[in-house]
Structures are given as structure tokens and as C-alpha cells.
């Protein structure tokens, strides 16, 4: 497991490299004062390049160097990249709710978020810490710290800088999507400088940041196609396919971010990704034979660079249990697959009318913190009492067949078991083509070792289909793409397809994968036109205020740096 050594060693470097530019205003917790400093990099440039890039990747995989949280005053587990984007994209939506009712976090489940909310500060900070780490790596290389005296070293550094630009663009997608007119910082913003908003006008500023990130991604993709068209990075690292998949996400939402749609560009890049990865697996589509192979203990096998020839997981966030790795090293956190399994589940009391056990998911812990909302549940096909569905994508759920009630009588943790289904998709079971592979599953532990799938090929198929149905291509191709996904789920294929059907299929396939809020905004169904339980803190739901298409910038950040706050906050 090559990445473990580099990522873990990189945590030391991450602790010593200053977080500057766009996060210079953040309150950061002190981390390990290691003796390793950039001044020593020239003594072993090859080794320190690996360790330093590991420090960048670490910020996407866990919450800070050596287990310390990077964001002061915000729970370490919550301050991870995956959980930050889950909070922003999923918790206020119709798919999931975080039911421990902490004062600030609790507001997120209702979608009522003032600029002073500490969770706004924590999630925003995570995104810009990651952006700053990417910039710092590039600056450190450009400033000559590594003494790159050979072509091999220069090429290695250039590739790692490209990877930093890709990772930076990934963090910027969530920043632009959720916060709108965010400051822009690339490697040209020096340490200690405040990253500027590009305009005080919200729409213009958001568009300008979008254009800068998209231009950089286009340049990266062009470079790979001209110089390394068969690019396949080692497992755990990003490359051409992640860069081009991020362009698909940007162009899918271009009209929201800029006022001008880019369906043709979305489709063009999606088709390119499909052309490279759409081979083998289910119906030779490049998708795993079994949906849950994306979310099991062995899902790293199905990531680019993994052991299986099918690489449905395009961008993976690696995790690794120490007990499973012969080196004795590991890479875990209270995010990623651990969060996506344990936050839903727990052992029900012996006398309860509902039944759930951590052992059902081969986990050593359960938090009882998330429930689904009934409007989301209803998007799947069910029998009369919503207990059993022919859709394979709900096979791991706890429903009325297990005594759970579908309706959210409250969003309170004390009512777990009687206030919503458990829409579980991650587990600690190894998965083969037929489902759970007990014989090859790891031991039940507190923190799980499965990866987190940031972007899957299934998302690219669905995005291509949406671009097509918005006029970019042939409708028959959209039907073909969506039927790969639908038939894998055990559902009847479509003979024709409209946008409403596609929107619901996207929800069913990508549920809880941190796309839902942006999807509903793109569909025009976030503010009004669609309501779910406890939306706006009303039991039957209500419309959001018109400015809720973005979150506010954190009030302290806006005030300290002179940023223009988002409209009507």
C-alpha cells in the first residue's frame, strides 16, 4: 500500500508547512512541531517530494496531522473534507438529517444557517485549508526548496504540482457551489497575503472564480491528452480522469454558477471519461457488477489503480485499517466509510420494536445520528407498506420490515428508530459480484478501512444523460447510459426518458454522495417547488428564503478580510 507510507509521513510535513494565503485568517490548532522543515527538502528531494505531496493528500483523507484537528473549535471528525461536504450538500436536503441537536449543527438539518454559525466557519475552513495546502506545495517547488537537479526529479515535481491543481479544483467546486463568491487563491498568492474576492458583485465574482478554475482544469486535461493520454496514476492519487470528471461537474452546473449553460462541454468531457473507463464490468459499461462493491470494505479494488480491472471509483479517498496492512500503518478517521456506515447505525435496545445491530454491517461502533426523510424514501419503488423494494440499492437499509417508522415525527436523536429509515449504503463487509463476501471481510472495528468514493463513473453517465436531455446529444444515448445504472439496480429499463425521471434516477443512484443540494438547485427545486419534512424547521416543510441558494460566508472571515457578504445575509 504505497500511499500509506507517503500519506502518513506527509502528515509531518503538513504540520510544518505554513498555512497561508486564503486561510491566513483562520484560527488553527497547533500541530506536531516536527524537526522536518522545507529547508531540509534539498537533502533528499525524491523522498521529500513524496512526503510533501502526502501531506496534501492527507488533508483530503483525515482531519489533520497526527490526529490533530486543523480547525480550532470544530469537532475533529466533522472537520474532515468528506464530512464537511456532506454537511453542506446532504444534511439540509431531503436525503439525510443529522439528528444530534447541537445548537449550531442542529440548524443545518433545517437549512437555517446564519453567517455566525460555527459549522459554516468549520466547513468553509476545511475547503480553504485544502486549497492552501495545494498552493503551498506548488510554491515550495517553485521557490526551489527541493533542488531539482535532474529531469526525472523535475518531471516528478511537475506531476505532483498537476495533482495539487486537480485537488485544488476539487475543493473549489464545493466552495463555489456552496458559498458562491469565494476568494480566489492559486500559487501566485503568496504566504501571508489575503486572497481576494475577484468582484464585490456576487454573480460576477462567482463567475470569475469558476472561469479561473475551469481554465486551469482544461489546461491540465489538454496536457495529459497531449503528453500522457493513457494516464493511470497509482492507487489513491488523482490524474486525467479525476481532472476531466471535475470538469463534468463544473459544466453540469455552469448555468447556476455563471448564468450560461455549458451542456455541450459537459457531454464532451463526460464522453471522454466514459471512453476511457467504460469497459468491462456490468454490461461492459465499466460499472461494478454489484452496486455495493463501490461501498464495501474492499472498494479500493474498484478504484483507479485498484486490483480489479473495473475502476468505477474515479476519485477515491483512501482509508486503511492498521490490522489489515502488513506494514502496521493505517489511514483512518471518523469520516469517509466510517462516517457513512456508523453514523446511521447502532444496536437497538433488546426490548425495542425496531431491530438494528452493528453486526449487521460488520462494524464495531454505531452512533445513531442520521435518518432519512420520507420524501426521499418515496422516490424508490416499494411494496404497499414501504418495507421491501425491488431496487437493489436499498438492500442494506433498515425499513418497516425491521420495525423502523418512515415518517420523521421529529429530528431528535432520542427518537432514533421511530423517526425515519436508515438509508445505509456503506458497510465493513467485503463485496463480490453477488453481494456480501463474509469469508474475505475484515474484523469488525471502530473505524472502518473502506475508501470513500468521491466521484464514480455512474455519476458521469448520469451527467452525460442530463446534458443530452438538455439538448447536447441524442436522447437514445441518454436512455442507454441510464439503463446501465437502472438495470444494475434490478429495475426495468427505460424505453424513453425525460428530465424528471432522470432527476429521480440520479437521486436513487447517488443518494448521500454529496450531490443532492447542488442537484436540487440546478433543477430549480431547492428554494421552492419541492418540499420535504422539516425543511425550514416546519414539520411538513416550507419554502426557503430566496437567498438560500448559497450559504453565507463566515461572518468572522468576511469582516476580517473585507469580503462582501453573500446577498441578504
Image (cartoon, rainbow, N blue to C red):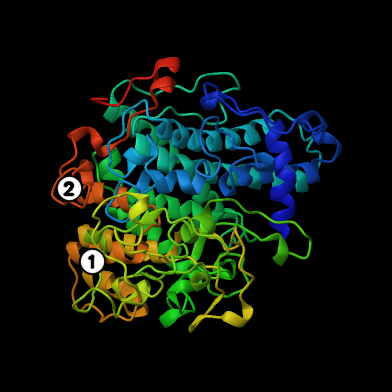
Q: Is residue 284 above or below residue 560?
A: below
Q: Nearer the viewer, residue 339 or 238?
A: 339
Across and down, in percent, residue 529 comes to 13, 49
Across and down, in percent, residue 94 comes to 27, 54
Tell me the quarter of the picture where residue 323 sits. bottom right
Taking the image as shown, residue 128 lies to the left or right of residue 417, namely: right
**Front label number (2 vs 1):** 2
Q: CA distance from mark 2 to mark 1?
A: 17 Å
- Residue at far left of view: 529
Q: Which residue is mark 1?
A: 379
Q: Residue at x 33, y 81 (%)?
A: 490
Q: Residues within 10 Å of mark 1 (few under 14, many from 20)?
A: few
Q: Residue at x 23, y 76 (%)?
A: 382
Report how many numbered discs are placed on residues in the image. 2
Tell me the quarter of the picture where residue 42 sits. top right
Taking the image as shown, residue 548 lies to the left or right of residue 119, namely: left
- Residue at far bottom of view: 434
Q: Is residue 565 above or below residue 80?
A: above
Amino acid at each position: 500500500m504505497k500511499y500509506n507510507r507517503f500519506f502518513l509521513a506527509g502528515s509531518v510535513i503538513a504540520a510544518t508547512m505554513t498555512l497561508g494565503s486564503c486561510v491566513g485568517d483562520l484560527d488553527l490548532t497547533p500541530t506536531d512541531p516536527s524537526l522536518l522543515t522545507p529547508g531540509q527538502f534539498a537533502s533528499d528531494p525524491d523522498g521529500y517530494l513524496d512526503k510533501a505531496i502526502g501531506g496534501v493528500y492527507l488533508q483530503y483523507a483525515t482531519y489533520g496531522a497526527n490526529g490533530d484537528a486543523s480547525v480550532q473549535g470544530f469537532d475533529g471528525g466533522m472537520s474532515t473534507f468528506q464530512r464537511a461536504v456532506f454537511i453542506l450538500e446532504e444534511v439540509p436536503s431531503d436525503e439525510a438529517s443529522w439528528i444530534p441537536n447541537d445548537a449550531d449543527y442542529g440548524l443545518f438539518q433545517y437549512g437555517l444557517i446564519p453567517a455566525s454559525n460555527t459549522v459554516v466557519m468549520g466547513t468553509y475552513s476545511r475547503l480553504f485549508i485544502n486549497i492552501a495546502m495545494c498552493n503551498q506545495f506548488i510554491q515550495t517547488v517553485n521557490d526551489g526548496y527541493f533542488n531539482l537537479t535532474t529531469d526525472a526529479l523535475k518531471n516528478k515535481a511537475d506531476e505532483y504540482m498537476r495533482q495539487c491543481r486537480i485537488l485544488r479544483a476539487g475543493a473549489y467546486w464545493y466552495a463555489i457551489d456552496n458559498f458562491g463568491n469565494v476568494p480566489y487563491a492559486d500559487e501566485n498568492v503568496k504566504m501571508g497575503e489575503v486572497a481576494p474576492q475577484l468582484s464585490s458583485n456576487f454573480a460576477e465574482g462567482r463567475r470569475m472564480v469558476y472561469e479561473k478554475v475551469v481554465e486551469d482544469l482544461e489546461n491540465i486535461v489538454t496536457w495529459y491528452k497531449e503528453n500522457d493520454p493513457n494516464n493511470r496514476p497509482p492507487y489513491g492519487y488523482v490524474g486525467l480522469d479525476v481532472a476531466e470528471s471535475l470538469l463534468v461537474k463544473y459544466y453540469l452546473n455552469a448555468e447556476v454558477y455563471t448564468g450560461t449553460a455549458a451542456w455541450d462541454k459537459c457531454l464532451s468531457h463526460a464522453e471522454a471519461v466514459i471512453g476511457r473507463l467504460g469497459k468491462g464490468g456490468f454490461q461492459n459499461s465499466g460499472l461494478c457488477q454489484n452496486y455495493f462493491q463501490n461501498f464495501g470494505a474492499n472498494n479500493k479494488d474498484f478504484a483507479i489503480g485498484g486490483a480489479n480491472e473495473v475502476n468505477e471509483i474515479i476519485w477515491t479517498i483512501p482509508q486503511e485499517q492498521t490490522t489489515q496492512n502488513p506494514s502496521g500503518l493505517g489511514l483512518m478517521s471518523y469520516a469517509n466509510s466510517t462516517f457513512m456506515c456508523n453514523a446511521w447505525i447502532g444496536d437497538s435496545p433488546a426490548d425495542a420494536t425496531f431491530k438494528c445491530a452493528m453486526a449487521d454491517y460488520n462494524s464495531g461502533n454505531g452512533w445513531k445520528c442520521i435518518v432519512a426523510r420520507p420524501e426521499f424514501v418515496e422516490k424508490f419503488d416499494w411494496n404497499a407498506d414501504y418495507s421491501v423494494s425491488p431496487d437493489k440499492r436499498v438492500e442494506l437499509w433498515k425499513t418497516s420490515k425491521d420495525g423502523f417508522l418512515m415518517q420523521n415525527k421529529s429530528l431528535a436523536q432520542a427518537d432514533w428508530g421511530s423517526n425515519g429509515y436508515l438509508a445505509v449504503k456503506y458497510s465493513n463487509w467485503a463485496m463480490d459480484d453477488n453481494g456480501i463476501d463474509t469469508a474475505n471481510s475484515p474484523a469488525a472495528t471502530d473505524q472502518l478501512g473502506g475508501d470513500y468514493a468521491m466521484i464514480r463513473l455512474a455519476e458521469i453517465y448520469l451527467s452525460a444523460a442530463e446534458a443530452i436531455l438538455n439538448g447536447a446529444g441524442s436522447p437514445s444515448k441518454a436512455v442507454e447510459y441510464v439503463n446501465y445504472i437502472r438495470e444494475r439496480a434490478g429495475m426495468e429499463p427505460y424505453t424513453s426518458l425525460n428530465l424528471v425521471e432522470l432527476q429521480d434516477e440520479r437521486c436513487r443512484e447517488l443518494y448521500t454522495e454529496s450531490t443532492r443540494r447542488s442537484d436540487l438547485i440546478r433543477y430549480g427545486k431547492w428554494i421552492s417547488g419541492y418540499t420535504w419534512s422539516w425543511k425550514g424547521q416546519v414539520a411538513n416543510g416550507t419554502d426557503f428564503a430566496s437567498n438560500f441558494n448559497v450559504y453565507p460566508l463566515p461572518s468572522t472571515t468576511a469582516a476580517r478580510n473585507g469580503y462582501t457578504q453573500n446577498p441578504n445575509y
